[in-house]
Image (cartoon, rainbow, N blue to C red):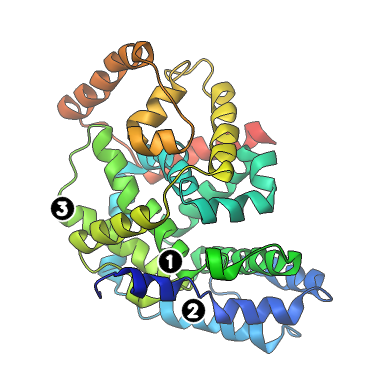
Amino acid sequence: MELHTGTWLDAFRELQDPLADRVIAKYFPAHKDLLQSHLASLGHNEDALPEGAFDELHALYLNITSTASKFDEEELLKGQDFFNVYASDIMLLLGFLSLPYCYTAAYGAEVLVKSKRILDDPARRLMDTAGFVFDVTNKKAFKPEGNALISILNVRLLHSVTRWYISQSGDWNDSEKGKPINQEDMAGTNLSFSLIAIRGLRKLGRFIEPRLAYDYINYWNKIGLLLGLDPRLLPDSNKDAFQLEKDIRTRHFRTSEAGVLLTDSLYRYYEKAVIDSPLEGLTKPFMIHLLGDKVARQLGLEVSNYDRLVFKPYQLFLNFRNYFFDTQDSYAKAYARFKENSLDET
């Protein structure tokens, strides 16, 4: 991977996802219901697009399936094994760390606010994102009977639809902010699911070997590639992932109205969701513990010394639990809890 200088990364702010964007340009707005129908017909990786699907959709789907067919099965298994060991913690971190971490990138947060649904229904946003993560980390994710490729196709087109609506609004300044959902922003988001999740595991008291850490980063490299991420933005080592994340954070993390709004919406949802759980009353200090003081302040989260004092025993408990006990986790246990929560939200 090349050195990520400012000029080098600036160029990626002008790049998006041409294959997916051509699909939306073809179907929108006149044929958007037809596109939804075509996508709804796909349930598993082995399914073919229906007759009548436009060539642009065939080209995108072929790109995804042909790219995935070249993946090394042993490398996939390593990443899936990692998730299987830490599934519940990773899903916890998804909401309390990965999502608010992304909100600190000011321009990316502004894109999310423009979609409105995230502000209006944070629970649905969490469920959708969690469902995607489960789809792509399942042991059968990339097999014919899996559905990772279908989920990736849908997310890729969702990103493109968001770009289309923002471009139609006429109130986005590409020269100032970069194009919406550009390659640099996509790279930062991809790292939030891998490198940032690993950092979160360590803050929960988990000891993660560097070799295993890169197994998981490399797994998300593959998912990122299928999501249309430029291969030049895929880290080829832990050190490279660390440097890329640092460079993106330095360039774009700051306080913004959008980031504060998104974080406040998420926080208010969690305040209700954690009632009668061990985290009741500890949502804010827990998020700050994971995010770190600087990022937390950029998101409008302030914690008092009293809050820190109250949270300290819980932090010590996390470290104690993970040091002395081999807590048995698995994909199946985490997924069962996800399905239970999904039913609670309906």
State which quadrant residue 308 falls in: top left
Determine the residue positioned at 29% across, 64% down.
Answer: 218
First reached walking from the N terminus: tag 2 or tag 3? 2
Label 3: how many Cα within 10 Å (few below 14, some 14–19, many 20+): few
Mark 2 to mark 1 CA distance (whole Å): 24 Å
- The secondary structure type at the circle numbered 1 is helix
Q: Residues within 10 Å of mark 2 (few under 14, many from 20)?
A: some
Q: Is residue 12 left or right of residue 44?
A: left
Please give the label number shown on residue 184: 1
Residue 42 or residue 189, whichever sits in front: 189
Which marked residue is nearer to the observer: mark 1 or mark 3? 1
Disc sitting over residue 127 in the figure: none
Residue sitting at x 70%, y 36%: 346
Tell me the residue that label 2 is attached to. Answer: 65
Q: Earlier in the sequence, mark 1 or mark 3?
A: 1
Q: How many marks?
A: 3
Q: Residue under circle 3?
A: 210
Q: Of the residues tagged 2 and 1, which is closer to the observer?
A: 1
Q: CA distance from mark 1 to mark 3?
A: 25 Å
Q: Position of residue 154 (x, y in %)?
A: 61, 65
Position of residue 147 in the picture relative to residue 82 (left or right):
right
